[in-house]
Each structure stands twice: as structure tokens, then as C-alpha cells.
Amino acid sequence: MSDFDGETTPMTGQGDAPSGARLVPRITIQAFCEHSQTAQVIESAAGDRRMSKVALTTHNGGLDGAVETYKTNPTPNLVIVETSLGADQILNALGRLAEVCDPSTRVIVIGHVNDVVLYRELIRAGVSEYLVMPTTTPVLISAISDLFAGADAAPIGRTIGFFSAKGGAGASTIAHNTAWAMARQFRQDVLILDLDLAFGTAALDFNQDPPQGIADAVYANDKMDAVMLDRLMSKAANHISLLAAPAVLDRTYDLSERSFEQIIELSQKHVPMVVIDIPHMWTDWVRHTLSAIDEVVIVAEPDLANLRNAKNIADTIKAARPAEVDPILVINKAGIPKRPEIPAAEFAASIECRLAGEVSFEPGLFGTAANNGQMIAEVSAGHKLNEVFKGISQQVTGRTQGGAGGKSGVLRLPDLFKKLKRAS
């Protein structure tokens, strides 16, 4: 598998972060702020998963502080400067900054003037980005990501993790059938990563017995690359591949926090949609994986224990990734006879997550599919559950959102200091 036509959901406002935004490469950023509110926005960005490789520091002094600093110090890859100057003064101040900056340095200006004439002047000057206060952390991250991982960068696939609120809630079954619906509906490649090394069922559910899989990738360490990833993947169906779990107990799987990080990043570079089947446990690597992927799907049964656990999971994920979309909820095994249940809408409202779908209790259908190594659509192509899985697939991939969108408060301005230096 190689390059693909990746899709991301466009930003619809200053407070929205684009789903599936690209990871920012290993760069150095220095920010010079005039107000504490601006410094808080920038410092919050440093904790975002997309900025995990970035070295970011904040300083006081605004634009003047940046000028004084770079008279005697080298400039980083990106300088962020805040200025409260009026429209007629900003360009002159930027000219002083250009005199002490390396031509390759990019600059984002955070200003307090919302003036189209100023925008045009900054465009002609070549500022990389202009953000108007009040702005937000998601907008800033998007601006940085666009600068350093823009249209000329390799496409990045969307990562979607499925996690059970309680053991036996059925996250694996939901993940695999959703992956099938994604592949059929969008006709794009889907890679399923089964992270339950000891007891994973992805190979069984697709009637596969691959000799290699996710464990080989985990223990390859620095040897893991795109060629090896392609060799370890097994084809399960048209547009669907697996990195299956070994599901053997000849060893224990004591993994470090970032054990799956490299595999997930490599997968994103080669497959447009990556479905991650995360086992029901709570370890450093599970917590890190949930905080580092694009979309988290909590799968729960409609009872009190699931509600408590789902609330804890949702709150933890929201706290770990405040600038990104909240987890979404799938209710599974709804309608078990004689079992008191919490209504799906009430369940979703209680944990403050969007309800993506409700999967009814169909033991005969799911049992037949599991025993045959098939998906629900293969066992019963006309069953109503296929529409449920199709709807879930649309929501987790962002394909239900239309329109071109826009980036309020952001202006794209090319090649700042090269122009100013040539003019001086």
C-alpha cells in the first residue's frame, strides 16, 4: 500500500480543530506574548498530541521582545509574535524583526486588529499566518500544522480506536463490522490493528490465520519501517487488511507507554483509515494510545456499570486532549429480554458524548457470524444492522459533514521574511 487520497474534516469555527489534523514534525518554536491569555493559548498547544515532537517555549515582550532576542541569538523554525500595535505600525515593526531573522524562519503574527486592509498588507509582506485575538488553541495548532505539514506533505490516514466500557461489551465486534462497512461504503483501504496481543479476535472474525502480525511489529523496535509493515499485514477482504494478534500465551506482554506509537504512525502514512481494536484494560500504553488517536469510540452495554466506566473513560480522554473532538458512544446489545436498561439517549447525555449508533441484541446473528469467521453483512446482507454499522462508519470518519468550511481568525500569508529582506 502506498499514497492515498486522504480526507480531513474542515474547521467550521475558531474553536474547532480539524479532525485528523497532521502531526507537526520535529521543529523548534519560540513565542513572544504581550498578554497572559495569549500565552495560555500557546502553552496549551504544547500539550496537544499533534505537537508532541515540537520544542516550544514562550517568552514575554511581544514583537519588541523578539527583535531584541534575535539580535544576539539564532532564530528557530517558527516565531510566534503577539502585537497590540495599530494597523499603520505593524508592518514597520515586522520590518525590524525581519532584519534580525534568518530568511528561512516562518512567522505567525497574533494581532488585535481585524482589518481587511491590514490582511492584504501582511499578505504582500509575506507573513506566514495572521491570527486575530481572541483565538484558540485548536486554531493555532491548525495554523502550525498547515505550515509544516501542508498540501505538499504525504497524506495522513485517520485513526479510529474502539474501546469497551466493560469487559464483554463487544468493542472488537463493533470495530470489525464498522471497518467492513467503511471499506465497502468508501472503497478505500482499511487496516485493522488488533492490540489485544494475548486474546485478540480479529483473525478469527475474518477467518484468517496469518503467521505474522502486530506482535512482530511491536518487537521489531527500530527495524520497523514501511516495507516491514507491508510484509506483516495480511489481506482479510477487499480493501481490508489486518495486523492480527498472536493470541498465544507463551509469553507475557508487558508493554511500554509508546509501544504502538511507531506502528500507528507508519500505518497512517500508508492507509487512509486505521481501525484500532484496543483491549479492555487500563495501562500506560492504553491511556497513551487513546489520547494520541483521531477518534475514540466507547462501546458500552446500557447498564449502570457500563455507564460509570464510560463516564470515567470519557472524562479522562477529554482531559487528555482538550483541543480535540470528544469521544463518541456506541450502545451494544440493546434490548436483551427482561433486562432493565438505560435508554441510549439518556446514557449518552449522562457521559456527555455523542451517540453514534445503537446495536440491538441479536445473539443468533452475531453467534453465526463469529463461528463462521464472517461479518454481519456476509451472513445477512439485508439485515437492518448493516445500516447501523454504515451510519457508525460515516460518523467516525467524518463523512457526514459537508460543506467547504472555513478558518475564522486565520489568514494564510506566504513567505514573509524573504520578501522583507529583499526589499531592505
Image (spheres, grey):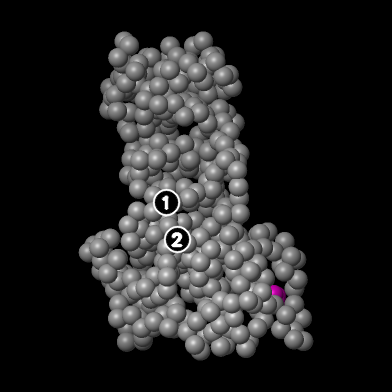
Q: What distance separates the C-alpha of mark 1 from that of mark 2?
A: 9 Å
Indicate the position of residue 97 as horizontal and vertical percent values: 37, 18
Indicate the position of residue 295 as horizontal and vertical percent values: 52, 58
Q: Residues within 10 Å of mark 2 (few under 14, many from 20)?
A: some
Closer to the camera in the image, 236 or 268: 236
Q: Tell me where the magenta segment starts and ends, as one range.
A: 302-306
Residue at the location (66% across, 59% down)? 354
Q: Is residue 305 magenta?
A: yes
Indicate the position of residue 278 as horizontal and vertical percent values: 47, 71
Could you tell me if residue 120 is visible in this image? Answer: yes
Q: Taken as a whole, is the magenta stretch helix, strand or loop?
A: helix
Occupied quadrant, residue 350: bottom right
* The C terminus: image quadrant: top left
Q: Amino acid at mark 2?
A: Gln
**Labels 1 and 2: the sequence-earlier one:** 1
Residues at discs 1 and 2 in contact (Cβ within 8 Å): yes
Residue located beneath label 1 in the image:
5
Could you tell me if residue 292 is visible in this image? Answer: no
* The N terminus: image quadrant: bottom left
Q: Amino acid at mark 1?
A: Asp
Which residue sits furthest left? 223
Residue located beneath label 2 in the image:
188
Occupied quadrant, residue 125: top left
Residue at the location (58% across, 33% down)? 408
